[in-house]
Structures are given as C-alpha cells and as structure tokens.
Image (tube, helix red, strand yellow):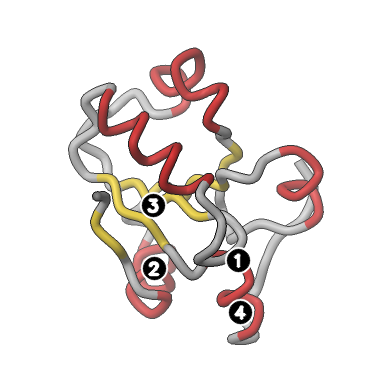
Amino acid sequence: MTALITREELEQEIAAGTVTVIDALGGEYYAKAHLPGAIALVEAEVDAEAARLLPDRDTAIVTYCSNPACQNSQAVASKLEALGYTNVRKYREGIQDWTDAGLTVESGR
C-alpha cells in the first residue's frame, strides 16, 4: 500500500516546491478544480505518459482524487510504483478535504 501524506504536510511541500502533485481525476474534474500546480494523470494514461511527465523516478510524487472513497489516486500510485517510481505517496482525503479546509485550488487546463 502506498504511503500516505497529510493535508498539512502536502500544503508545506507544495509551498516549498518539493513535490509533484498528480490529480488522478483528470478531464473535466481537473479543469474545474485541482490542487495548486497539480498535473492531470489518470490510470489509463500512466504507462504512456509517466516517463514524459515524470522523468525522475526518484522525485517526490503525491497522488490524489476526490475523497477517501475514490480509488483513482491509489490506482495511479500503484502503477507509478510498478514502473519504478520510488517516492510516491497518496493524499487519501483528496480535493474535498483540501477545499473543506478553505485552501486554494486552481482551475483550467
């Protein structure tokens, strides 16, 4: 199982620029709202896009989706780990928790 990261830890890492955040919802969900600096990468695109989007397999990566019931973030994290990415964590609470805490999101592609 992928290691977890808390909202507070993720907020600090985003502010410090020490993490690549992956929105595992993609599409219109991503366009409507995503965490600051997040890139969209859904499970079906991991094999084809991971090397281009994430060339350093040791970089700190955090995946998220909507909330704890959503399995997209785990699916993307598992695929990345299977491809040899060594520092993948999951923000299990997702964008719902982020926005409920009043934190900033971005929109658009």
Q: Position of residue 17 (x, y in %)?
A: 38, 57
Q: Around disc 1, counting alpha carbons within 10 Å, would you say few (fewer than 14), some (14 to 19), or many (20 or more)?
A: many
Name above or below for residue 103 compared with residue 32: below
Which numbered dot is residue 75? Answer: none
Identified at 57% across, 75% down, the residue is: 98
- Closer to the camera in the image, 36 or 5: 5
Labels 4 and 3: the sequence-earlier one = 3
Q: Position of residue 1 (x, y in %)?
A: 24, 50
- Quarter of the image where the C terminus is located: top right
Which numbered dot is residue 95? Answer: 1
Q: Mark 4 = which residue?
A: 103
Q: Mark 3 = which residue?
A: 62
Q: Mark 2 = which residue?
A: 10
Name above or below for residue 22 compared with residue 16: above
Name the kind of residue labelled 1 in the image: Ile
Q: Are marks 2 and 3 in contact (CB under 8 Å)?
A: yes
Q: Quadrant of residue 81?
A: top left
Name the kind of residue labelled 2 in the image: Leu
Name the kind of residue labelled 4 in the image: Leu
Element under disc 1: helix
Left or right of 16? Residue 57 is left
Labels 2 and 1: the sequence-earlier one = 2
Labels 4 and 2: the sequence-earlier one = 2
Labels 2 and 3: the sequence-earlier one = 2
Separation (CA) of disc 4 from disc 3: 17 Å
Q: Quadrant of residue 47?
A: top left
Separation (CA) of disc 2 from disc 3: 8 Å
Q: Are marks 3 and 1 in contact (CB under 8 Å)?
A: no
Name above or below for residue 33 compared with residue 63: below
Labels 3 and 1: the sequence-earlier one = 3
Left or right of 34? Residue 12 is left
Left or right of 11? Residue 23 is right
